[in-house]
Amino acid sequence: MTDNARARKLADRIQVVVAETLDRRIKDPRLGFVTITDARVTGDLREATVFYTVYGDDEERAASAAALESAKGVLRSEVGRQTGVRFTPTLAFVPDALPDNARTIEDLLDKARTRDAEVREVSTGATYAGEADPYRKPEDEDDEAGTPGSTDKNEGPASA
């Protein structure tokens, strides 16, 4: 069992090596504009999951996934050569869901903006159902002087 810091360092190194190798050595025409977004290594350093995104439509994503699968051996041998670990981890390529999540969040924000604009349009020219200021305020000092139980400054002590 190894520590997590070593697994993180190896994952960072694998991410860099795979990205550089894809850029320099892999000449597969199916490989589109691929970005390696993250890499994670298991605690025993035997398996590495590499997350990637592809700029383009679904057809280009499928072609790039096939190109990555076919280049897996070359990428793994390059990772083993550049990292120098005893056992080179097996590579698994997983499409990153980050762009889809970001698109969903943007759509939700757009819906919220349109609803806010609708509420703003409806509220223009609207009046309050009650008073404009619904909070209670303390009575004026003049009103308090006439209430029973209050003391006035000019009155002296009560005489019997």
Image: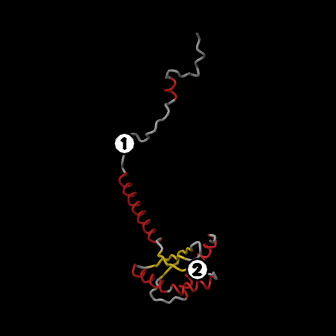
User: Percent position (x, y) of residue 140?
Assistant: 50, 30
Residue at label 2?
Answer: 16
Left or right of 112? Residue 87 is right
Could you tell me how far apart the alpha carbons at marks 1 and 2 are, in whole angstroms? 63 Å
Residue at label 1?
Answer: 129
Q: How many C-alpha atoms fall within 10 Å of the one at disc 1: few (<14), some, or many (≥20)?
A: few
Quadrant holding the C terminus: top right
Left or right of 150? Residue 57 is left
User: Percent position (x, y) of residue 87?
Assistant: 60, 81
Q: Sequence-wise, which precedes: disc 1 or disc 2? A: 2
User: Percent position (x, y) of residue 104?
Assistant: 42, 67
Based on the displayed image, in which of its 4 quarters is residue 116 positioned?
A: bottom left
Task: Report helix, strand or loop for mark 1.
Answer: loop
Based on the displayed image, in which of its 4 quarters is residue 79 positioned?
A: bottom right
- Is 31 in front, or is 151? 31
The circle on residue 33 is: none
Which residue is at a point 62% across and 74% down the rendered structure image?
9
Task: Report helix, strand or loop for mark 2.
Answer: helix
Q: How many C-alpha atoms fall within 10 Å of the one at disc 2: few (<14), some, or many (≥20)?
A: some
Which residue is at a point 56% across and 85% down the rendered structure image?
21
Which residue is at a point 60% across and 16% down the rendered structure image?
157
* Amino acid at the residue labelled 2: Val
Quadrant holding the N terminus: bottom right
* Amino acid at the residue labelled 1: Ala
Residue sticking out furthest to the top = 160
